[in-house]
Structures are given as structure tokens and as C-alpha cells.
């Protein structure tokens, strides 16, 4: 199995694990809001609170509370298990990316091992993407002409690889926060009366 194929397996597994973690955490929060088990879940539940719930033991309490507590413990433990599995997945992904042709991407602000892996796996095979424009089209970040009459305008591309599109969007948001050149570009766009959305596409 090639590095790209191995990374594709890890990226898909990570997607499944993070989706399950989100669903499990949401279920835990909903339960803690419905049943008073001593955890204030009106705001975001912290990692420390999740760890606390996972350490709970059965108590001498009414059946409803005991049932809810047992389920809360199960959900909290599953969240922590998934955190560990995602961390292992990320470590494996990092090692593979560092040994691949995508390694230089890790030197770019806003690009981590997950985004680099997604970029490499979207590329899929030599010759699929022959230019920056082709890669932009693959990612769904290229502007689509939508001019009419004397008005020249473009619309966003809603197609392309949505996983790659999402990864690049997150990378651009990071660059808008941490990269001086990107921040300066966004400020120039704002000074020109432009919104930040086209800036994100260009970032």
C-alpha cells in the first residue's frame, strides 16, 4: 500500500472517529442537561468534567438517576477512548506525511498533518492535477463566471472535493489569524469595501 493510500485510510478513519465523538459528546451533554447528576452542562462541557464523569461509580440512588448516571459514565468513557484513538491516528498520519511529498506543506502557516494528508490524498495520482487552476477546481475554490450584461461577477464553486474544501477553509481561517501577510491582504480587501469571503477563497 502506498503512502497516499495509507493516508487515505487514516483520513477516513479520523473522519469517522471525530463524527462519532461529536455525536457521543452531544448525547452526554443532552443527558446531563435533562437529568441533574451534579454537572452543570448549561455551557460547554470541559475535558475535566468529562474525565470526572468517566470516573464516577454506581451510587445508591433512585432508579432513574442510577440509569442516567450509568449511561453518562459510558458516554464519557467513549469520548475519552475516541480522544486517545484520534491522537494515535494523528501521530501515524504525521509520520506518514513527514515521509511523503507533502512534507513541505507542514512548513506553511495553517497547514497541519491532517490538512497536508487531505491535500495529498485528493491529488490521488500523478498527472491528475497539472496546474494551480486545476487544483483550485478540484478543491471547489475556483470562482465560476456569472456575468450578465455589463456586470462582470463570479460566484462560488459549490462542487469539488468537499473534504479538501473544508480542510483548506480551516487552513485559511488559521492564516487569517496567525499569518501577517494574509492578515494584511484581508485588511486591504476590507479597505476596498470587499467582504472577507472572497479573501478566504484567495487566501
Image: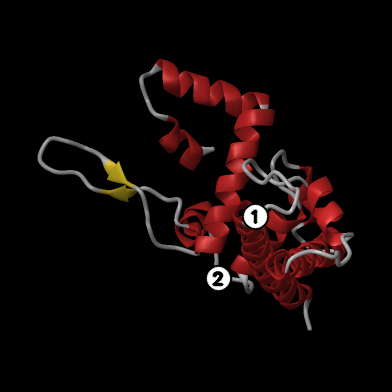
Q: Is residue 96 visible?
A: no
Between residues 56 and 25, which one lies in front from this camera angle? Answer: 56
Q: Is residue 181 visible?
A: yes
Between residues 80 and 142, which one lies in front from this camera angle? Answer: 80
The mark found on residue 128 in the picture is 2
Residue 16 percent location from the top left of the image: 66, 71
Q: CA distance from mark 1 to mark 2?
A: 44 Å
Under tag 2, what secondary structure?
loop
List the single residue furthest toward the top.
191
Query: Residue drawn 43% across and 20% down?
Result: 190
Residue 139 percent location from the top left of the image: 50, 58
Residue 45 percent location from the top left of the image: 71, 47
Q: Is residue 148 left or right of residue 77?
A: left
* Residue pointed to by mark 1: 29
The mark found on residue 69 in the picture is none
Marked residue nearer the N-terminal end (1 or 2): 1
Under tag 1, what secondary structure?
helix
Amino acid at each position: 500500500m502506498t503512502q497516499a493510500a495509507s493516508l487515505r485510510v487514516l483520513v477516513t478513519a479520523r473522519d469517522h472517529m471525530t463524527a462519532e465523538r461529536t455525536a457521543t459528546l452531544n448525547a452526554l451533554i443532552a443527558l446531563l442537561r435533562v437529568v441533574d447528576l451534579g454537572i452543570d452542562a448549561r455551557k460547554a462541557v470541559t475535558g475535566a468534567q468529562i474525565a470526572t464523569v468517566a470516573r464516577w461509580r454506581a451510587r445508591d440512588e433512585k432508579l432513574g438517576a442510577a440509569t442516567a448516571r450509568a449511561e453518562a459514565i459510558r458516554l464519557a468513557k467513549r469520548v475519552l477512548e475516541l480522544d486517545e484513538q484520534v491522537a494515535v491516528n494523528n501521530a501515524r498520519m504525521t509520520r506518514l506525511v513527514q515521509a511523503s511529498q507533502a512534507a513541505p506543506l507542514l512548513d506553511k502557516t495553517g497547514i497541519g498533518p491532517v490538512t497536508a494528508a487531505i491535500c495529498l490524498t485528493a491529488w490521488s495520482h500523478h498527472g491528475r492535477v497539472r496546474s494551480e487552476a486545476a487544483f483550485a477546481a478540484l478543491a471547489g475554490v475556483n470562482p465560476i463566471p456569472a456575468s450578465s450584461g455589463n456586470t462582470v461577477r463570479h460566484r462560488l464553486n459549490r462542487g469539488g472535493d468537499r473534504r479538501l474544501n473544508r480542510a483548506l477553509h480551516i487552513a485559511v481561517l488559521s492564516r487569517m489569524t496567525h499569518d501577517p501577510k494574509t492578515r494584511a491582504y484581508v485588511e486591504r480587501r476590507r479597505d476596498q469595501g470587499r467582504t472577507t469571503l472572497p479573501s478566504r477563497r484567495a487566501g
